[in-house]
Amino acid sequence: MRVTLLATGGTIASTGDDGDGATPELDAAAIERRVPEVDGVDDVAVETFATIPSPHMTVERLWALTERLRDLEPETDAVVVTHGTDTLEETAYFLDLCYDGPLPVAITGAMRTASDPTPDGPMNVEAGLRAVASDGAPAGRVVVAFAGSLYAARDASKTHTTAIDAFESREFGPLGTVDYSGVTWRRRETGVETYTPDPDALSNDVFGMTVTADLPPSHLEPGTESDAVCLASLGAGHVPPAVVPAVAEIRDAGVPVVVTSRCGAGRLASTTYDYSGSERFLAELGCHVTDLQLPKARIKTVVALAADRLDDAFERR
Ligand code: ASP
């Protein structure tokens, strides 16, 4: 099997002594050289897509990466993408929603730089290679391979700033694991969705905000000028009462509003409470709802808007 290692930058590509300000500079070949051989992988082709820290990732670059995966199809059997961890979950989910080809894809990174005496990057890439080369690797899907666990792109989130096992799938757990005994796929994803966005309609102008106690409603004003608004509401779909008119203004301006929870797991209520700012505002204002975490709700909104499929993408109250 031939696997392509597609490097985009991040800590896994970064060198620099502690306190000396590491920056991503290693290319795909330099990352690959540090990774042990993997059974079943006869050849690792290397390609440097970018050498950026992941906070520099853009919607435009995400689309270019999706197209690159498509172009790689004739020349490879699987792909491992290396990426900074900060926005890895967004890239994983964007690719998962938009890549419609047959290749199994793993995305991974590192919490320690390549110049750290005990870097975690090589083992994470090794796990990614083993995952995509394994029986049971989901064709055409993107999995996050991190610290021995394999997560669905939809569910994986970075939940720690520095820990080696920085990723979790908080509510549903990993799809599988990579350890000395090999790769174990324990469960399959259901309800997988693919979108075909119009690349010219992909917009980063989707306003995202986490709702907090006593949030001044004026903070939502930019939402009226945006292509869509994503809100991480309180609890199971609640906002301070003063925020309801601000959301109504956004809706009156014809802007879709997608609401999730800031809790990090679980779905929104529909008829549990009935106070001002309770979840009833979701139905009153025709909001879309989701259980995705805010960064991924925003990515899905960007993709679904560009595919003109917002109503397919999200349930509406
Ligand atoms: N700031 C880095 C990045 O996301 C962090 C990392 O890769 O772990 O590029």
Image: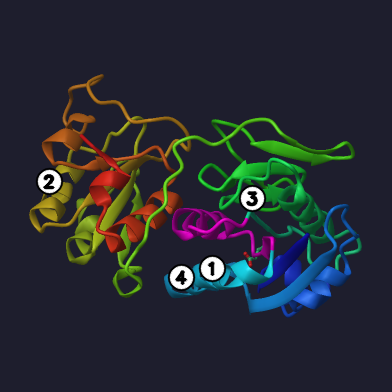
Residue corresponding to mark 4: 63
Task: Please tell me which residue lies in front, 294 or 31.
Answer: 31
Callout 4 crowding tier (Cα within 10 Å): few <14, some 14–19, many ≥20: many
Using residue 47 as the reference point, say whether residue 172 is left or right of it.
Answer: left
Task: Tell me if I can see residue 21 in this picture.
Answer: no
**Disc 3/disc 1 C-alpha distance (Å):** 19 Å
Quarter for ligand 1? bottom right
Residue 93 magenta: yes
Q: Residue at 75% across / 79% down in the picture?
A: 27
Q: Which residues are magenta?
A: 77-103
Percent of width and height locating residue 28:
75, 75
What number is the disc on residue 70?
Answer: 1
Element type at mark 2: helix
Callout 3 crowding tier (Cα within 10 Å): few <14, some 14–19, many ≥20: many
Mark 3 / mark 2, whichever is N-terminal: 3
Mark 4 / mark 1, whichever is N-terminal: 4
Residue corresponding to mark 3: 144
Q: Amino acid at mark 4?
A: Trp
Task: Please tell me which residue lies in front, 308 or 300.
Answer: 308
Residue corresponding to mark 2: 245
Q: Residue at 79% across / 41% down in the picture?
A: 178
Element type at mark 1: helix
Percent of width and height locating residue 121:
79, 60
Mark closer to the observer (3, 2): 3
**Disc 1/disc 2 C-alpha distance (Å):** 44 Å
Task: Tell me if I can see residue 305 in this picture.
Answer: yes
Q: Amino acid at mark 1?
A: Arg
